[in-house]
Image: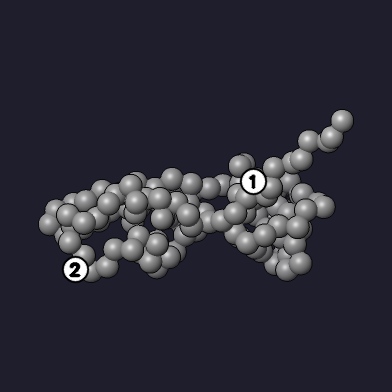
Amino acid sequence: MVGASRTGAGAVVEATGVSPGHPMTEVDGEAVAARVEALPWVERASVQRLWPATVRIRLVERTPVAQAVARDGVVLVDRTGRLLATRPSPVPGLVAIDGLEPGAPAIAFPPPVAPST
């Protein structure tokens, strides 16, 4: 695995659905990448089969740009509104978002509702 600093190797391996002894011909790179991209910190993933028995995963991780106050501390948020992780205390240098109730990591804040006229 290449490119992971915040995403644990175990979580990536589990998300791939590929286990030792899995036939290389049955590894669907696009499907594996999509499952890995569902992890909270993963923005993009690519999969490469290296014969005879290696699957290489390359990741680009998300960058937190803001934090939303939550019951248990703060939730880090990327530029797309994706919730990344909960921290017990605010992170210096990140924009603070008040008035929202964040959900679980790997989901995004709901889009704003336009006022009715």
Q: Is residue 100 left or right of residue 47?
A: right
Closest to the observer, 6 or 48: 48
Whether residue 58 is visible here, answered yes or no, is no
The crowding category of the residue bearing disc 1, from other C-alpha atoms within 10 Å (few below 14, some 14 to 19, many at least 20), is some
- The way the protein has been coloured in the rendering is one colour
What is the CA distance from the residue labelled 2 to the residue labelled 1?
Answer: 38 Å
Residue assigned mark 2: 21
Closest to the observer, 5 or 46: 46
Whether residue 105 is visible here, answered yes or no, is yes
Q: Residue at x 73, y 46 (%)?
A: 95
Q: Is residue 30 left or right of residue 89?
A: left
Q: Amino acid at mark 2?
A: Gly
Residue 76: x and y in percent read 65, 54
- Identify the residue at the far right of this view: 117
2 lies above or below 9:
above
Residue 26: x and y in percent read 21, 56
Closest to the observer, 56 or 17: 17
14 lies above or below 59:
below
116 lies above or below 94:
above
Q: Are marks 2 and 1 in contact (CB under 8 Å)?
A: no
User: Which quadrant of the figure contains the N terminus?
Assistant: bottom left
Residue assigned mark 1: 81
Q: Is residue 80 left or right of residue 102?
A: left
The crowding category of the residue bearing disc 2, from other C-alpha atoms within 10 Å (few below 14, some 14 to 19, many at least 20), is few
